[in-house]
Amino acid sequence: MMNSKYSILAILILFLAPNLNYAQFKKIDFDQNKKVSAEQIRLLPKPIKESTNQTTHPEVAFTSLDESSLIAVKTGLKPGILNERNVPSYIEGKINFNGNRSSIANQALDYVVAAAPLMKIKNPIDEFKVSHVETDDLKITHVRMQQYVGNLPIYGAEIIVHGDDEGFDFLNGSYFPSPEITNTTANLEDVQALNTVKSDLQVTVNYENDITAVGNMTPTSQLVIYPFEGSFKLAYHITSYKNIIDRWEYFVDAVDGTIIRKYLSVCKFHNHKHDHTAQCNVQNAVESPLESQLLGDGKATANAQDLFNTSRLINTYEVSSKFYMIDGSRDMFVSAPAQLPNEPEGVIWTIDAFNTSPAKDNFNYDHVTSTNNLWSNKTAVSAHYNGGKAFEYFRNIHNRKSINGAGGNIISLINVADEDGSSMGNAFWNGQAMFYGNGDGAFQPLARGLDVAGHEMTHGVVQSTANLDYEGESGALNESFADVFGSMIDRDDWKIGEDVVKTSAFPSGALRSLEDPHNGASTNNFNAGWQPRHYDERYKGTEDNGGVHINSGIPNWAFFKFASAIGKDKAEKVYYRALTTYLTKSSKFVDCRVAVIKAATDLYSTTEINAAKKAFDEVGILGDTGGNYETDINANPGQEFILTTGANNVGLFIYNTAGALLGQISSKSVLSKPSISDDGSEIVFVGKDNIVYYITIDWTKNPVTPQEQTLSDDPVWRNAIISKDGLKIAATTTELKNEVYVFYFGGSSVTSNIFELYNPTYTQGVTTGDVLYADAMEFDITGEYIMYDAENEITSNTSGSINYFDISFIKVWNNGAKSFSLGEIEKLYSSLPKNVSIGNPTFSKNSPYIIAIDCIDENDNVNILASNIETGTTNLIYENNTLGYPNYSSKDDNLMFDNEGSASLDLGIAKLKSNKIEVAATPTRLISGRRWAVWFSNGKRNLSDVEITENLNAGFTIVENPVSDILRLQIKGDIYKNTDIKISDITGKTLVQNAINITQDNQTTELSTAALIPGIYFVTLQSGNVTNTLKFVKR
């Protein structure tokens, strides 16, 4: 018996020869005058082989990869998951600039230049400008950049490049492929846009002089390129206050003056309907009657009762024998007595609004004071104490100096009334200060809650760091981070608002719960505290700025799971770093996942990284992991061998895996690379005489004696391959034609079908006819698909013709119906970089989603690449000196390939890592003077068990997959009742949605997929707490 373990008898390092010119990749010489008649297109019967009941399974349906994976091989940079703009949400890979004496900012720009092809950026130096450079305590430098069109920023388009002294290695953010924008000249002046906003807000404001004690309320205006509904508009982005609380974001068309979009950006503690909304007109913001300037006497402390009747130690400040609720004891305090008490710097400051409303023109506020440092105002004590605790948390745990990180004042206004003068049941961060109401029918005084103070202060931290937009998923992240750090400041439980809500309105006793966002309320009862906890439950409406207080439950639950796995102490550090270092203004949930995983990588180890991935997986924020569609099949259990041809294409030989010759099985001159069945018992190839030859081997006999015969009478064949089960042979002829012939040997007679090759497009029903012919071919493990390379020709009346090779998949058989398929075709790559050709594809033996190919780039460099076509990851296996015709070993732990030796073609071998697409050791030479290796085993395995990633516990099945225009589902009535059904694409975008009532078991329902372009999709069923997803292919 042969040793099944890989060993090497002779190890020789493979040396690279000078690059050869492979601009035409490989050239097949056709006799243009030779035509093949229909009568010649036949194969003779071969020995009968038992038919198997192979399964038709959808997961081996192939969809196109993006060309970015090929670009990544060239640059050494790897793209992360593609976002809704079809560009990577992050890019990783080290680029060392130690030899570059330019500034850190310029080195970061050099990284963007290298990443530009992946980002689909045409002019990276012009399109990205550095806005901020920071080096943190881990000695990692973070360079923030804004994307521009000319001199105008694209709103929300930011990236961050990260690296250390050895170079930059990570880029993330939200950006756009280079936009085509012709008009960047505004027809309106900014003052006209400001007047439009003023009119729309129905306020009269002195834009230059209106500054209040709680911060600068002056409107800001910036001319930007505003992404809107799939296009770009030239617009003024204006931030304006209707009153001290209500901060609004406006986008005014700079061409015609219309309001494109507006939304309220004040960060409320909640958005429930128990309180009122301010809608009064404000004629002028009122100056507060603050005390006149007095000389300061210094810091003081006091013990006073808060709203819980608990004695709290608070810090106050004495100015001329009067005490003020100003905390100047922190290390951020700027000692300048002449400015006290009205203009302190670096303090925690509590101010009384005297039950007036910022929405009214009689809004009044003043210092909270005492003549003897005794304090009876319990609301002020609670707010002041909680503000101090929130400061201490960020200072002590995260080394953050106040809200803005630079010692800015922390201002709290208490006794804030609603616009009708009633008690307000909410709290706000307005971009400058925190405002606390005294409660209503659903809430107690908001100043009671330490987590309320932590929540509102965190909004300020978010504003000063990632500055997340307050709408959609970005806004939900804004709210989520406020909840996360609110729960870490008040860390005795996972509840938010438990000290301020009334149980009559919130039966759970809390406003929100990170532990269970459903919060004991009925589904979609948002006013009772229900939030989605899984991405499939997310709110998709427009209320609440797109559900910022609703959908925050999803990342909240992810944090709970993450912190429960690794502990709060570590989790809070990771989340703070994610917020301050990796998130940008337009970050979505998937960006948060990336940020948290990257922050965990920076700070900790594999345990914490895996915990982060698992937490986001469990809430449906899948990111680059997506679903797991990578199920392998068991390796062939037989002995392993290597079938080769001679270097001069004369003869077939069998070697053992150590490179020792076992014998010659044919003396024929070989035209096509031999193809072998999965059990090693059948081999087909085309000889140089254009005849199809067929060899059978009975491995049970001793000695083993191969039997060779012909399968064709007419010399018209150029290539032939056999399916893994031996029931089908596919072949091409010597005529230059875009056709493949498939023969089935499982019936009473040989049947056949002709398949025309074409290039599919993304327009349904539209194809292109530029395929000249197919060359290398290989059946997949199921025998349903053939992967092939083909030469294509694009002709032009002005520039001549362009020829290139690429790779496609054609479905030729349906195992379920035991009949020929319709010949649907998918491309391996939807497009190729300029002057790049790929070919000679081969499947891994046990992973249908892993392939290896030859690739020739624009400089005629010959590379062997390996790809995971589920994840879209491609890696370089070897920089070769000739076409490699790669082939995987039986266990997929090695890859063999042709290599040009000093005297002849030889066979090299590359040891692979467990992912099957990365090299584990330097490739070596295994067999000299041979080529076209096919590694095989002579055991038997049940090919009918090839079932990949079907969720057997989903409670529903897809009746037929792939689908055409109708998706049919069979649904179990004991699992699903009132059911929501949705179809989404690979980015998570919902494309089709419906609601049905399941009234019987195994009920069949149909959804139209006619509007979907060919590709991979997911169908999700949700009923109550049951949510399951299956994958299907639209053809």
Image (cartoon, grey):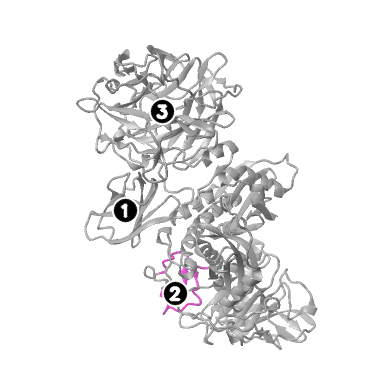
* Front-most of residues 851 and 405: 851
Find residue 841 and report its horizontal and vertical position in percent.
Answer: 44, 30
The amino acid pointed to by label 1 is Ser
- Residues at marks 2 and 1, CA–CA distance in whole angstroms: 44 Å
Q: Which residue in the structure is indicated by mark 3?
A: 773
Residue under the point 31% across and 33% down: 943
Q: Which mark is in front, 1 or 3?
A: 3
Q: Earlier in the sequence, mark 2 or mark 1?
A: 2
Q: Main secondary structure of the magenta part?
A: loop
The quadrant the N terminus occupies is top left
Q: Quadrant of residue 489?
A: bottom right
The amino acid pointed to by label 2 is Gly
The reply to whether the magenta stretch includes residue 503 is: yes
* Front-most of residues 182 and 751: 182
- Residues at marks 1 and 3, CA–CA distance in whole angstroms: 35 Å
Q: Quadrant of residue 716?
A: top left
Dot 2: element: loop
Q: Is residue 723 visible?
A: no
Q: Which residue in the structure is indicated by mark 2?
A: 509
Q: Outermost residue, left direction?
A: 748
Mark 2: few/some/many CA within 10 Å (<14, 14-19, 20+): many
* Front-most of residues 690 and 199: 199
Q: Which residue in the structure is indicated by mark 1?
A: 1008
Q: Is residue 507 visible?
A: yes
The amino acid pointed to by label 3 is Tyr
Q: Which mark is residue 151?
A: none
Find residue 706 and report its horizontal and vertical position in percent.
Answer: 32, 14
Give the magenta range: 492-519
